[in-house]
Structures are given as structure tokens and as C-alpha cells.
Image (cartoon, rainbow, N blue to C red):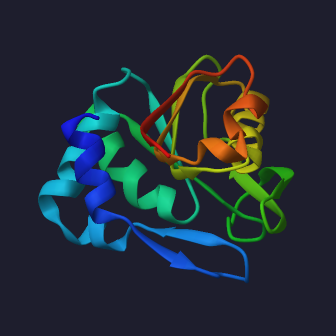
Amino acid sequence: MSDLSRLILDHVRDIRDYPQPGVLFKDITPLLADPEALAAVVDGFAGLHQVDKVVGIEARGFILAAPTAYRLGAGFVPVRKKGKLPAETLEASYDLEYGSATIEVHRDAFTPGERVLIVDDVLATGGTARAAVELVRRAGADVVAIAVLMELAFLKGRERLDGVKVHSLVIV
């Protein structure tokens, strides 16, 4: 196990039955509160690819994607839950491990051909990540990769992301 993986695992706590019974929630707030751990994660993401834009998926993906974009000298684009963006949007719906949802991105968030890194905290079933990939592509940009802090391998989310590179800093 790498030093970064150990650092992440030491700073993520499990919360049972949140947000509903049967779900084991991965709480990253202790990691976010530690400046050295947060910097190591951002450096880990920023070392993956040179891109034009970094997408952050609401809400914890914002926290990791924005400093990654800054570190890369790239723009930051939020992908938000339906109804939260003020201008014209593209939307995609998906299922997740405990329900369904719709996410949106501004229609003009990307220039055709831009290289995009999608960042989120956890890759679980892959529904959210797949919807984000769809939005970026529909807007005319190219998805270089998806980068996540933690991948829950037993949920097989990576299998729903055919043809997209997935970088997980920790796989559990």
C-alpha cells in the first residue's frame, strides 16, 4: 500500500446506516480538516494529467476538484444537482446505490475539444461518474480521465465506465 493510500485511509471514517439503513458512508471530513492530507490528495490528482478543465461533482467533488484545477492552472466546472445552476444546462439522470438523481452542467461550460478531468470523492456504483462523462461529452469536450479519492470495488462502478480511464487513490 502506498503512503498516500495509507494517509487517506487513516483520515476517512466509516459511518454506518447513513444516509439510510444498510449504507456504509465514507466520511472524508477528517481528511479535509488535515492540511497535509488534503494537500497530498490534491497533489495526487494534479499529477495525473494536464487538462484544460477539472469537473467537480456535487458536493464533495467540488472540494477536491477546485484546488486540483488551481494546481493544474485549469478551469473548474461544477456539475450540480438539477435546478442549482442559473444558466442554460444539459442534464443526465442516473441511479445510485440508494436512489436516483439528475445532474446538470452549464451548456457553455466547455469549448469543443477541451481536455477534462472529472474529480469526485467516491466511486461507488458508477452512475454519477457515468452521467458526468455523458454531460462533458455532450458539451463537446473530451474526458481524459476520472479521478476519485476512494473506489468501492465491491460495487463494480468501474465496469460502468467503459473506455474511460479511472484513477483511484485508494481502492477498498
Location of the N terminus (image quadrant): top left
Q: Position of residue 22 (x, y in %)?
A: 72, 75
**In front: 168, or 132?**
168
Q: Position of residue 86 (x, y in %)?
A: 68, 66
Q: Where is residue 33 in the image (x, y as percent from the top left)?
A: 23, 72
| Up/down of 22 relative to 93, above or below | below
Instruction: Please tell me which residue is depicted at 58% across the width and 62% down the height of the picture.
Output: 58
Q: Quadrant of residue 63?
A: bottom left
Instruction: Please tell me which residue is depicted at 19% across the width and 50% down the height of the picture.
Output: 39
Left or right, 96 with respect to 79, comes to: right
Left or right, 66 with respect to 139, comes to: left
Instruction: Please tell me which residue is depicted at 30% across the width and 50% down the height of the picture.
Output: 67
**In front: 56, or 96?**
96
| Up/down of 163 relative to 64, above or below | above
Q: Position of residue 133 (x, y in %)?
A: 70, 34
Instruction: Please tell me which residue is depicted at 77% across the width and 47% down the height of the picture.
Output: 127
**In front: 39, or 9?**
9
The answer to whether residue 166 is visible is yes
The answer to whether residue 73 is visible is no
